[in-house]
Amino acid sequence: MEQVTQAVNEMWLVVAAVLVMFMQAGFALVEAGFTRAKNAGNIIMKNMMDFSVGGLTYWAFGFALAYGGSSFGGLVAYGDAFFFDDPSRGSEWFFQVVFAATAATIISGALAERVKFTSYLLYTPFITGLIYPLVTHWVWGGGWLSQLGFFDFAGSGVVHMLGGAAALAGVLIVGPRLGKYDEEGRPRPMPGHSLTHGALGVFILWFGWYGFNAGSTLAAVGQDIASPAVATTLAACAGSVGAMAAAWTLRGKPDVGFTINGVLAGLVGITAGAASIGFGLSVVTGLVAGVLMVASVVILERLGIDDPVGAISVHGTAGLWGLIAVALFSGDASLLPQLIGAVAIVGWTFGISHLVFRLIEATVGMRVSMEEELAGLDRSEHGSDAYPEFVFQHEVVDLREPAVALQETTKTA
């Protein structure tokens, strides 16, 4: 019976990890759909490298810093670098690496359409190999935040708020896209090329999220894996409804983009308390997350922070709410440790990310040229087009009037 129990638990962890890995496809579709056609290939490349480079980095030393078995005062683990053949911990490593890749992928969408591919590659190892592993050690590896009483069941703060904070650091350095703001600083709409792709990506993410939340039981035998799945479902539904209602009230129409992003906000919001927040309060958690996401997107846009896919709001703002919701709606956490943990995670992530982005900016540069941005990153960075039959091949770029040139370009892209 002991061997059967171990086998079932390991099977569940591997299946859950596969579901989370499939979320990479969801992120790729959401980010590509919410951005313009001329940058779709670049989005795909960044998402592919998030997992590929991130997986190798996490294997080399990320896992060791998070779960190496020893610790310096609960701050950082060490040991098990270059995770070689250890079948007893293989399922654990696999489950953790897909979480690390998720945190990295959040940044891709926020920096879309204007960042050099080389610069993006330089940053990825830092989040998967250093920033994220230390936070996971603090919370899930027996580190100082867990000793303080901080609680995050599946990663509202550890994964999503962390990704949102890193994304904010990058966006503040790289600046808004050309044409996003008019001469008076007012934001202009820059719609993505495919709401269909965006919606399909959200459904894939929703599907994979059951591995994220229910899988965080880390076992199947003797565990309640159904309750986290139910709470996840209800929060996602409520997040979508809340975001739709907020956007409808604000803009007079039930906006499609806000509504499907509301699903993700609800999922992020419930992730910290999926195993402990009751079903009715899961609805409240998701509903509030959806409304907060819409408010956050509008506020950030007015502040000059250009996030094409709303990643900072979906993951950062809703992630923070998720940490607070655990303290308000369950008995697993108190408010003060949750707030201390939130400040620590955001401070560490934003600070290191800002430093790394600044170093990249000072050396190879973060942003493509104006000509490259107007032409699209698919062509300038990768030498091809994601949609070669539909992208206008002979653009005339007026360097004196970038906004006018951009408007002409976006008519065809």
Image: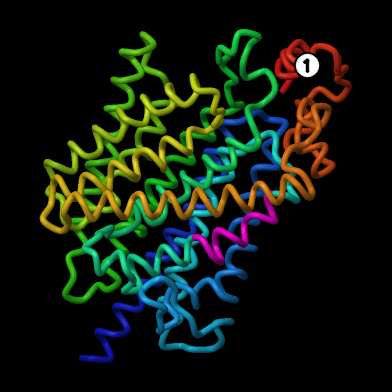
Q: Is residue 130 magenta?
A: yes
Residue 295 relative to residue 393: left or right: left
Residue name at image x 25 percent, y 69 percent: 147
Type of amino acid under label 1: Pro
Q: Where 92 falls versus 52 (above or below)?
A: below
Asked if residue 175 lies left or right of residue 156, the reply is right
Q: Quadrant of the N terminus?
A: bottom left
Q: Position of residue 205 (x, y in %)?
A: 43, 47
Residues in magenta? 120-131
Display colour scheme: rainbow
Does residue 254 belong to the magenta stretch?
Answer: no
Examine the rendered structure and indicate whether residue 281 appears above or below residue 15. above
Q: Residue furthest front?
A: 73
Q: Residues within 10 Å of mark 1 (few under 14, many from 20)?
A: some
Q: Residue at position x 28%, y 45% from top?
A: 322
Q: How many marks?
A: 1
Counting from the top left corner in percent of width and height, residue 204 is at 44, 46
Q: Considering depth in this image, is 68 or 238 the residue closer to the camera? A: 68
Above or below for 311 versus 36:
below
**Residue at which label 1 appears:** 402
For the C terminus, the image quarter is top right
> Could you tell me residue 312's position as x and y percent?
46, 38
**Is most of the magenta stretch helix, strand or loop?**
helix
Q: Residue at x 41, y 84 (%)?
A: 70
- Report helix, strand or loop for mark 1: helix
Q: Residue at x 46, y 75 (%)?
A: 93
Q: How far from the left and from the top, in percent, is residue 359? A: 70, 51
